[in-house]
Image (cartoon, rainbow, N blue to C red):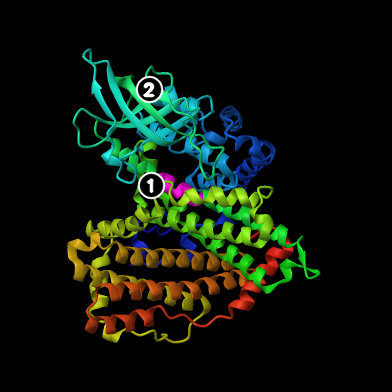
Amino acid sequence: MDRKVLKSGEFLVERIDAKDIFIPEEFNEEQRMIAQTCQDFLEAEVYPNMDKVDKQDRELMKSILKKSGELGLMGISIPEEYNGFGQSFVTQMLAAETIGAGYSFSVAFMAHCGIGTLPIMYYGNEEQRQKYVTKLATGELIGAYCLTEPGAGSDANAGKTNARLSEDGKHYILNGQKMWITNAGFADVQTVFAKIDNDRVLSAFIVEKDFPGVVINPDEHKMGIKGSSTAQIFYNDVKVPVENLLGKRGEGFRIALSILHMGRIKLGGNVLGAAKKAINDSVKYANERKQFGVLISTFGAIKHKLAEQVIRTFAAEAANYRVSKDIDDLIEKYKSEGCDKGRATIDGISHYAVEAAILKVYGSEVLDFVIDEAVQIHGGMGYSAEMAVEKGYRDSRINRIFEGTNEINRLLVVDTAMKRAMKGDFNLYGKAEELYNSIDRISDAKTGKEGYYQEKTRQIENFKKAILIVIHGASKKFDKQLVNEQEVLNNLSDMITETYVAESLALRTEKIESLKGSAAAGLYQDILNVFVYDAAEKLRKAGLDAVYSFASPEEASALARVVETLTRADGVNVKDARRRIADRLIGDNCYRF
């Protein structure tokens, strides 16, 4: 490997060069063609049918899904030997991003291609892959993932669905109930999680909808994503052939967690496409709507909104593709060591659990911000069902709940990073203690003359120092009880998230300049300047909230001082920077950043 790749969470203590990350500006021609094929499919098959699909026409949704399978869109992540195209994880994320602009179709499509297909691809044996994955990859079969139960949501292992071996040893007899199951109304194949006998942990089973005893309820009535079939499924003495046990007995919880890591990071790509669609709708409306005799796109308040939509989306995009390439490299490393393709892929994705949680939380909240501002830019028309942003507004809200709530994922960011450090993946605790013990000597003094990117690197490295100091202080105060201090963990999670995204954006901007020259980088430096300036204030607030939540009055004074020092950012003319960003968007009349 000719580039430096950090382990999950290691960015907190290590620096990486711009040359060592992947940025969207490096997509090759094949990747751009795949994205264009996805976009063309949305234009030809999805958008013209969205009103009908949103009336819960299950058969229409299934027919559109099958058309996407016939085009090969469902097989992008599947190896060629199982009727797929075996594309890289970066390419999969680009496809996920593009399809993300497809409203409820995107939900059905991604559920099928991800959690509906990949458990069997990654954990199935060869017979199971040949029987099911080859048909899931082409759309001949549609998949669903059945984990959640009335009493088991975030606490997945609390599920009551049960399986027992039949007397003849040929079947597992499955009984239980699942809810909030995407594609339930028309899925042919379900991955169902249940406990065998009195096992403490889950096992996983491949269940066909036509097995006797499988009962599917009518679709739920939902706030948004109305075209996506979501229903409860009941299992009444369902006889599941023993050969349909997925993975090993008791491996279901590991399968569920691994697939959720994959779902989180793919959702991070999905919401990018939805955000860019909302930005395009926003700027087009602003360039058509007149008030007081002029286009509203000329107003400073509207330019502020348009620019902020771009800034947050562009930053999220930088973080998404940075980690996507890291995953690709780790997958190749595992394969070179003799690991099965399926297991290599899911292990590569699962390794980056910290970043997956960051992207899920950050991306879903960016989309909610972007689409909310899109409605506001549309004014009264934004509240009308005639406009696409009304649908986008309702559809966006589920993303903060999907794939583990944002509350759970915020806790995972910190908990997973700390556990990885305790295993020795990187020296978080040593560096944190060293910084904490030297807080009286910490300053923000520049070390000589700095170039532009050196300045941004210093600021972001200071953010990391602030995080480590707060982690050490909180750990020192609460010890093993820190896990119960969710407010403090949320503060830390927000600090870590803002820092990872800021660093990704800084590296992307620097690499753009190295590829295209300083003239081309000017507008991206505006994006970076505003983002880091705003991130500094967010880190300051989160850091101080945490400090005042755990430190004694004597400690708090010193810790607050160092947090304020390390989260200081140079002043930025944010008005002019945002206007330049907005003017570019307004001139292009679409997102071309």
Q: Is residue 518 visible?
A: no
Q: Nearer the viewer, residue 289 or 206?
A: 289
| Amino acid residing under circle 1 | His
Picture residue at 43% right of the left edge, 46% below the top: 402
Q: Position of residue 492 (x, y in %)?
A: 34, 66
Which stretch appears magenta?
262-269
Residue on which the image places disc 2 = 127
Q: Earlier in the sequence, mark 1 or mark 2?
A: 2
- Label 2, residues with CA under 10 Å away: few <14, some 14-19, many ≥20: few
Q: Residue 457's spot in the image, x, y percent?
A: 45, 74
**Foreground: 387 or 30?**
387
Q: Residue at x 63, y 62 (%)?
A: 376
- The answer to whether residue 351 is visible is yes
- Disc 1 to disc 2, how far (Cα)? 25 Å
Q: Is residue 417 left or right of residue 366?
A: left
Look at 56% across and 41% down and name the residue there: 104
SS at mark 2 in the image: helix
Q: Residues within 10 Å of mark 1 (few under 14, many from 20)?
A: many
Residue 502, numbered circle: none
For badge 2, the amino acid type reads Glu
Residue 163: image quadrant is: top left
Task: Provide the major secondary structure of the magenta segment.
Answer: helix
Residue 549 as seen in the image, left or right of residue 30: left
Tag 1 near tag 2, CB within 8 Å: no
- Is residue 344 shown above or below 559? above
* Magenta region includes residue 229: no
Give x and y (percent) for residue 465. 34, 74
View extreme (right): residue:
293
Q: Secondary structure at mark 1?
A: helix
Query: Which quarter of the figure is the C terminus placed in?
Result: bottom right
Question: Residue most toward the top?
Answer: 168
Read off the residue under disc 1: 261
